Amino acid sequence: MGCILAVDHGTKKTGFAIADGLRIICEPLDVAHVTGDGPELLAHIEALCGERDVERILVGLPIHMDGVESSRAADVRRFGERVAAHLAAVGLPAPVSYWDERLSTKEADSLLVEAGYTGDARKSRRDSWSALVVLRDWLEAGEPAD
């Protein structure tokens, strides 16, 4: 089994987390400080996939507390489609799945506080730790395809 790359997509920066092939270790990766979903972000994801034998991309999907997808969810789904198409075009095909990211930022903040991060150190890691929460929740749910 390959790794799972989780993505917390943002308009100004994007967070990443990875689970190893055996699903034993999940860890946050560095945040990419690029806007939108342009070629720079796609190249970054391609590099991560190439370095780590990624078999699936997991993208956090913004959903309201009532269970309805937010207005930004359509943008996130388009981003996921672009990622899948780009990876297929460069010979690194990886299916894209989506997972509810409700409250992931709040949970990430709690984890960062537990880990001893404060101020700017916590803020700079928040997006990748949010991706970590999404990944953890998806794995605990049994890795559903969608």
Image (cartoon, helix red, strand yellow):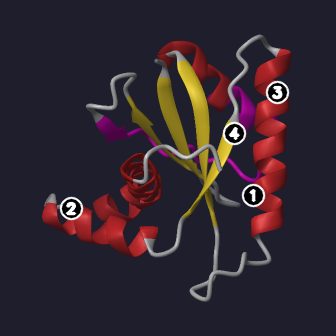
Residue sitting at x 82%, y 61%: 75
Identify the residue under disc 4. 96
Q: Is residue 34 magenta?
A: yes
CB under 8 Å between discs 4 and 3? no
> Could you tell me how far apart the alpha carbons at marks 4 and 3 are, in whole angstroms?
12 Å
Q: Does 56 appear above or below 65?
A: above
| Circle nearer the N terminus (4, 2) | 4
Nearer to us of marks 1 and 2 is 1
Residue type highlighted by circle 4: Val
The three-letter code of the residue at mark 1 reads: Val
The residue singled out by tag 1 in the image is: 76
Which of the numbered marks, if any, corresponds to residue 117? 2
Within 10 Å of disc 1 (Cα), the crowding (few <14, some 14-19, many 20+) is: many
What element does badge 2 sit on? loop
**Residue 1: where, in percent of width, then height?**
46, 18
> CB of mark 3 within 8 Å of CB of mark 1?
no
Q: Secondary structure at mark 4?
A: strand
The x and y percentages for residue 13 are 60, 54
In the picture of the structure, the residue carrying the numbered disc 3 is 86
Q: Residue at x 65, y 50 (%)?
A: 146
**Sequence-first tag of 1 and 2:** 1
For residue 56, which numbered disc appears in the image? Answer: none
Q: Nearer the viewer, mark 4 or mark 1?
A: 4
